[in-house]
Amino acid sequence: MDPRDTAPDSWEQEDDVEATVDGQLESTFTALNVNAKPFVPNINAAEFVPVFVTKGHQENNDSAVAVDKNSSMEVTDNAAPVENGDTETSTEELWDQRESEPNQEEPGGGDRGPELPEITEKTAPDMIEEEEEVQIPKVQPTQPDAPRKEHINVVFIGHVDAGKSTIGGQIMYLTGMVDKRTLEKYEREAKEKNRETWYLSWALDTNQEERDKGKTVEVGRAYFETEKKHFTILDAPGHKSFVPNMIGGASQADLAVLVISARKGEFETGFEKGGQTREHAMLAKTAGVKHLIVLVNKMDDPTVSWSLERYEECKEKLVPFLKKVGFNPKKDIHFMPCSGLTGANLKEPTDMCSWYTGLPFIPHLDSLPHFNRPFDGPVRLPIVDKYKDMGTVILGKLESGSISKAQQLVMMPNRHVVEVLSFLSDDVETDDAGPGENLKLRLKGIEEEEILPGFILCNAENLCHSGRTFDAQIVIIEHKSIICPGYNAVLHIHTCIEEVQITALICLVDKKSGEKSKTRPRFVKQDQVCIARLRTAGTICLETFKDFPQMGRFTLRDEGKTIAIGKVLKLVADRD
């Protein structure tokens, strides 16, 4: 009868045996090298038989029932040469043997190598599974001791169908974030739907509705790395119905890429009054984007065929408008031709375009100067989105300050004290993060229902301001009739969207001289600048533009159009 089937003499004794085995396993598993290279067995190696196996044989013949906690090594050694033994016990015992042997014969450890082929023979399926798991991550996570790359958020903006998602997908392929096999799968699926040219955009448009219609709805997120920098792609929707989503994406960006189509008719449609090229450029500037790269896409189109004349025509029309919005053409704007579908001039220069002498797109991004961000400033993290996943998870871009694990923070305007359990920076778990990083934080001490997009995480020592009434300087960009006190619109400030009413017009500001009128205006109209008092429907978090520009800029929208842009000058305490 098998000794394992019989009841032990005393239950205490049995517990002791299990405890010692567990302890032994624990100590051996901590010594495992997790980052070791995959083992490739040498099939032609001679079979290795240790000396103590023969001793173990004799002892085993003498007493078959001598299965003791101290002789577990000998049992496993005996099991190793048996080819067709009981597989369940042999694999477990082999692991025990493999890990505990080097501990006994530490110097040299030469016997470990040749012994492994037998293990691999028995556990071949396990090895295959392990190898497959090793190949899954597309990007190696950076070593903890490696210097941190600068983190830059790039938003792709422009008219619908200009090729924003396609360029984003192509960049991910060129930088190795999407493998060829996945793209081939997308290409097959796109061909079945008669949408062959859309397959690259599917890397960012993951939603089924977005793929069916070929239109981005939500801001797509992805990331890629160059030699010097780490970039987060924010793929904004181009359709006018989804401009609020685009504003949310632009508010997280450091750098904007305005994609325009060089194809005959498409550029004109996007640039005319109703087109999104104008609106997006203006909204990006309002959201605080300082540097703009204009990608003239679809240069490989038969109607364009890399024509310098067409490229210059697009450039001439755009520059005066971008200048009017507030970009400096010499410092802030950089034009370059490209083709999103073929990938020409994105990573490598193309022969088709000999007249363009500048750097291609990705090397140009890598060569940009560093952004100055305050590491020692107060913690400010506007929340973009939230969901439940083993706790409350929030998404957002850290505007200033730095966050570390287990830190206590305050959620404004509700003043909830929360603790950071863990966080991911671009899907890589880290212990601390600096300004400019896109983070996913898991919080303790607050429910998902108690958070709204537009709330802000702050440190307790330096809370952000919150309120309902503020004075602001507003530029009326597009409005057919006049605007009087009592006018209602939708306010977009950082990631917050709230209804707002202009309660009073304080004065008009002269555009050229900056002088303020001495009398209160009764109304304002298009292209005028005024200082007005605004009151929101609910309490929001905001700062003055002078103290914190990222949280002091805003946009006013009504009836699907951007009506005005402005900056917060003064916060007014509520009387009630």
Image: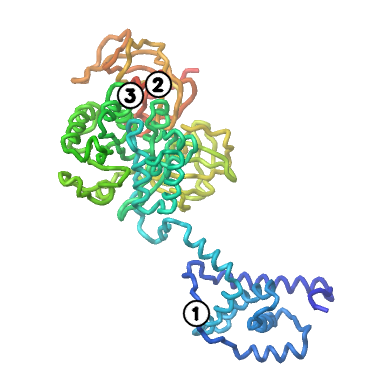
Tag 1: amino acid: Asn
Q: Which residue is mark 3?
A: 565
Q: Which residue is mark 2?
A: 560
SS state under label 1: loop
Q: Which residue is mark 1?
A: 42
Picture quadrant where residue 218 is located: top left
Q: Find residue 186 and name its label.
A: none
Lateral position of residue 269 relative to residue 73, left or right: left
Dot 2, how many residues are within 10 Å of its Cα: few (below 14), some (14-19), or many (20+)?
Answer: few
Is 46 rendered above or below residue 288?
A: below
Residue mark closest to the camera, 2 vs 3 = 2
Is 250 rendered above or below residue 45?
A: above
Residue mark closest to the camera, 3 vs 1 = 1
Cα distance in 3D space between marks 3 and 1: 70 Å
- Could you tell me if residue 295 is visible in this image? no
Q: Where in the figure is residue 149, as x and y percent of width and height?
A: 34, 53
Residue mark closest to the camera, 2 vs 1 = 1
Lateral position of residue 174 relative to residue 140, left or right: left
Towards the viewer: 363 or 192: 192
